[in-house]
Image (spheres, rainbow, N blue to C red):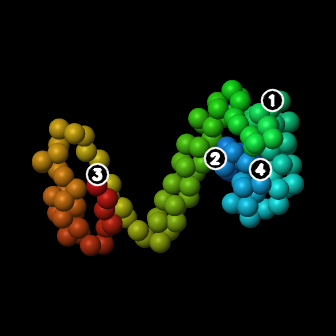
Amino acid sequence: MLNARIKLRHLQAFLAVARQRSFARAAERLAITQPGISKTIRELEETLGTSLFERTPKGVALNQAGLTLLRHAGPAIRALEEGIGAIGEARDGVRRLRVGRSPPWRVACSPRHCGTGMRRRRSMPTSV
């Protein structure tokens, strides 16, 4: 079960530090102070009961716990962003049709062919 003390800002800060490999660059990217991002990561580590990064003079690297969290936090944030986007689209009356294809369908349903046919329904954005 998700610990109620873990907030979205904790995961955003974690992902930024993991991607930037630097507290200072992550703070700059998130437009917060370096002490602020350090405090946020410290709160997350205290809540989880483990450190997430190996800190070195050259920056930071994910340790095993950090790698584990990264495998789950990134997709979770992306899913949340997609869900929020879908709510906004539904609220605004936007309908979207997404068509996936596997390699055997190369000729029968290429993006050029499927996209052309579906674009006739101009009220519905499409992506192939």
Q: Residue at x 28, y 55 (%)?
A: 128
Q: CA distance from mark 3 to mark 4?
A: 40 Å
The answer to which of 104 and 84 lies nearer the viewer is 104
Q: Callout 1: few (<14), some (14-19), or many (20+) C-alpha neighbours within 10 Å?
A: few
Position of residue 101 in the picture relative to residue 76 (left or right):
left
- Which of discs 1 and 2 lies nearer the camera? The answer is 2
Q: Callout 3: few (<14), some (14-19), or many (20+) C-alpha neighbours within 10 Å?
A: few
Report if residue 120 is visible in the image.
yes
The answer to which of 45 and 58 lies nearer the viewer is 58
Q: Residue 15: x and y, percent? A: 66, 46
Q: CA distance from mark 3 to mark 1?
A: 42 Å
- Which of discs 3 and 4 lies nearer the camera? The answer is 4
Position of residue 32 in the picture relative to residue 67 (left or right):
right
SS at badge 2: helix
Instruction: Please give the residue where the numbered disc 3 appears in the rendered image.
Output: 99
Q: Residue at x 63, y 47 (%)?
A: 19
The answer to which of 26 and 82 lies nearer the viewer is 26
Instruction: Please give the residue where the numbered disc 2 appears in the rendered image.
Output: 19
- Give, as a three-letter code, the residue at label 1: Thr
Q: Callout 4: few (<14), some (14-19), or many (20+) C-alpha neighbours within 10 Å?
A: many
Image vertical order of residue 11 relative to residue 71, above or below = below
Q: Which mark is residue 50?
A: 1
